[in-house]
Image: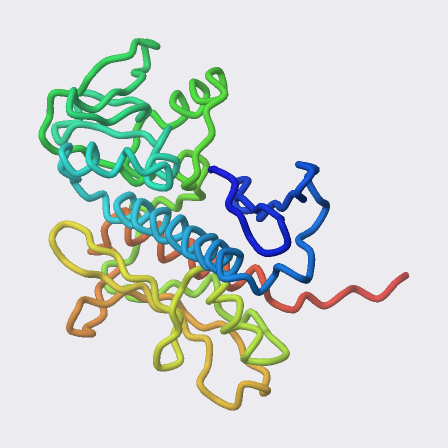
Amino acid sequence: MAWLAVAGGYEVTLDGENLVCRNAAGKTLRSVPKAVREDPVVVGLKQLTEWLTRHEAQCRADVERWMVRSLQVPATLLAEVWADEAWASAARNLVVTTPDGEQVGFLRDASEKGIGIVDLDGETVRLDADQILFPHPVLLEDIDDLREFAADLELSQAIDQLFREVWVRPADLDAAATRVTRYSGGRYDQLRHLTARASQLGFRVRGGFAVCRVFENGQVVEARSWVGSDDPYYSTETGDLFFTRSDGVALPLREVGPVAWSEGNRMAAGLYAGRVVEKEDAA
């Protein structure tokens, strides 16, 4: 970014998200002088950095939503947003597939020429599909190979995909079971601590429940875990995990899809992990 003139003969610019100032002699200063902090140019640059920060966070949230919902994204859309580094950095190196699952690889580029990936043979290829799938890791059968290959190539992901914790639904669930109880009883000294942890982990709290909303197999499924609805300063405990349809009716656990099951258990486990753990008395 070019240097912009401000009051007092100073000039300012952005170095990434940092505001940098230099004096009339061209010397870069350690901090922005107080005399120019309220200059309209400086204020405008600060507002720009705040907007960029929000934009980058929104891009990451949207790409993660594509993955959690295993959405098919039009290749043309991906090519259009790729010019924006915020979008590109959020999606780069994620595992993508064609809708039929025949082609799998790490996303490296998107343009009018097509979607460029590095496949498991180490070859750079262009996908010829009109739709691109960002699969949830629980759906990746060869995830161990993908993890190993990503490590060999030293690829990093802005979105937690390959190393996201996943839970696989047991095959021997009771046909009548509707609740998972293993995360119940996690004590918190104050309800506000538990709701704050839910928010920190990215989950909404509604009606006393932490909620994880998943779109899978054409329907919306909500994973819900009780956190409490009393005074925020009262103690509370985590409750059972259960899953509902969009109309609020609880689903038998056997009917919960693999993504909803994994994401629901991920939420409940994350809440339970923040519980108060009593220290054993020293011997």
**Residue at the spot 56% in from the left edge and 46% down from the top edge:** 12
Residue 82 position in % (x across, y down): 27, 34
Q: Is residue 249 above or below residue 74?
A: below
Residue 30 position in % (x across, y down): 72, 46
Q: Is residue 62 left or right of residue 21?
A: left
Q: Is residue 117 above or below residue 281?
A: above
Residue 81 position in % (x across, y down): 24, 39
Please state the total of marks drawn on the protein image: 0
- Give the quadrant of the C terminus: bottom right
Residue 221 position in % (x across, y down): 22, 61
**Residue at the spot 46% in from the left edge and 75% down from the top edge:** 227
Tell me the quarter of the picture where residue 202 sits.
bottom left
Q: Is residue 154 left or right of residue 244?
A: right
**Residue at the spot 11% in from the left edge and 53% down from the top edge:** 218
Task: Give the residue furthest to the right.
Answer: 283
Q: Is residue 42 above or below residue 101?
A: below
Q: How is the image coloured?
A: rainbow
Q: Is residue 198 above or below residue 5?
A: below
Task: Give the residue furthest to the left.
Answer: 130
Q: Is residue 282 left or right of residue 55?
A: right
**Residue at the spot 32% in from the left edge and 29% down from the top edge:** 95
Q: Is residue 21 left or right of residue 95?
A: right
Tell me the quarter of the picture where residue 126 sits.
top left
- 180 and 146: which one is in front? 146
